[in-house]
Amino acid sequence: MKIIEKTTEFWLDGRSAVAIGKFDGVHLGHRKLLHKITEQKSKGLQAVVFTFDTSAAAFFGGADKELTTLAEKRRIFEAMGVDVLIEFPLNRDTAATKPQEFIQRYLASQMHTAYICAGDDLSFGYRGAGNYELLEQYAGAFGYRAELIDKVAVGGAAVSSTRVREAVRKGDMESAARMLGMPYSVSGIVEHGRQLGRTIGMPTANIVPDADKLLPPNGVYYSRAVIGDRICRGISNVGCRPTVSEDPKIGVETYLYDFADRLYGQDITVQLLAYRRPEMRFDSLESLKAQMEADIAAGRDHA
């Protein structure tokens, strides 16, 4: 997958099938858009995602934490068959681009758009004035086909990043997974911890998520870890490990079943499947070990 970043001066070779959006969470609705553009590859078009290096909310000062980091989005887009990812710089100048200029300059001239799909909540250009209706209005003039894509419903309501965010904040990982089409994940590089887990026979892989990553409530979760091509069952603690550390920094600490390899320095993705219990402070390492043993035993039985 080709990645274009930090520039507005780009030109694509050949004609494109384009999806525009923030893609926060890359939920089922987003995946429907992505499937639409990758289907166009059979017609000789390249599948192009146009997103922003900074969300509009962050740029205008109302930022919330992200469901998916930039690195996580890149992995998902590539796995889904996207050919080109444009991470458009959002700044004072680009935010002032009139919607009609956006269509003419970026979609028509620089991206050679032949097909574009969008939902009815799409907004682009100055003050978000551009929408699907405007795309459709200019389709004939600039030689592309616009298709309106219906939202995907789960649980009787349309899937949205807001709904996914609410589920994650509640620790309802099952609902989040149904809307995402996959478990909610946290990625990072395995770091050296205090290695107390190893001394009590329960070694763990510790990652510190990106500061902008939305995490569920502190607690213990049934989980899986994706390590390269391997998927390993585990149980994870999200939080600051109050029994053994005074560091307020939030991390994700995962015990992997039947796994003996060292992971320090490796990039792993932890999928949080279901909430088990809140994070707790224990009065001794023995109490902590007993609770960890109970958690691990329960995790072995969790489907």
Image (cartoon, rainbow, N blue to C red):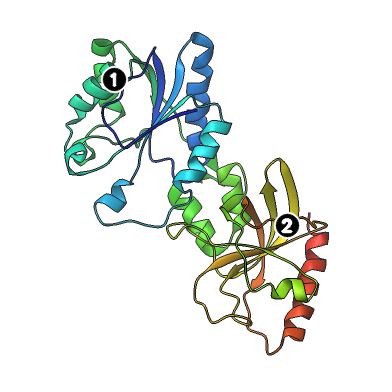
Q: Is residue 280 above or below residue 59?
A: below
Residue 127 picture quarter: top left
Q: Earlier in the sequence, mark 2 or mark 1?
A: 1
Q: Residues within 10 Å of mark 1 (few under 14, many from 20)?
A: some
Q: Amino acid at mark 1?
A: Gln
The residue that disc 2 covers is 262
Examine the image and state in which quarter residue 186 appears: bottom right
Q: Disc 2 residue type? A: Arg
Measured from the top left, where is residue 83 in percent x and y?
48, 24
Disc marking residue 110: 1
Most foreground residue, 211 or 165: 211
Local SS, label 1: helix
Q: What's the residue at 79%, 56% (across, down)?
A: 259
How far is the residue under mark 2 from the one under mark 1? 47 Å
Q: Position of residue 146 (x, y in %)?
A: 36, 19
Q: Position of residue 229 (x, y in %)?
A: 71, 40
- Residue 32, given in percent of the width and then of the height, sits at 51, 31
| Of residues 220 and 134, the one drawn nearer to the viewer in this rendering | 220
Vertical arrangement, residue 293 with respect to residue 190, above or below = below
Decide if residue 159 is in sight here. no
* Figure quadrant of the C terminus: bottom right
Label 2 element class: loop
Position of 292 with respect to 29 (left or right) is right
* Numbered badge on residue 293: none
Local packing at callout 2 (Cα closer than 10 Å; few below 14, some 14-19, many 20+) is few
40 lies above or below 130? above
Residue under the point 62% across and 75% down: 279
Whether residue 274 is visible? yes
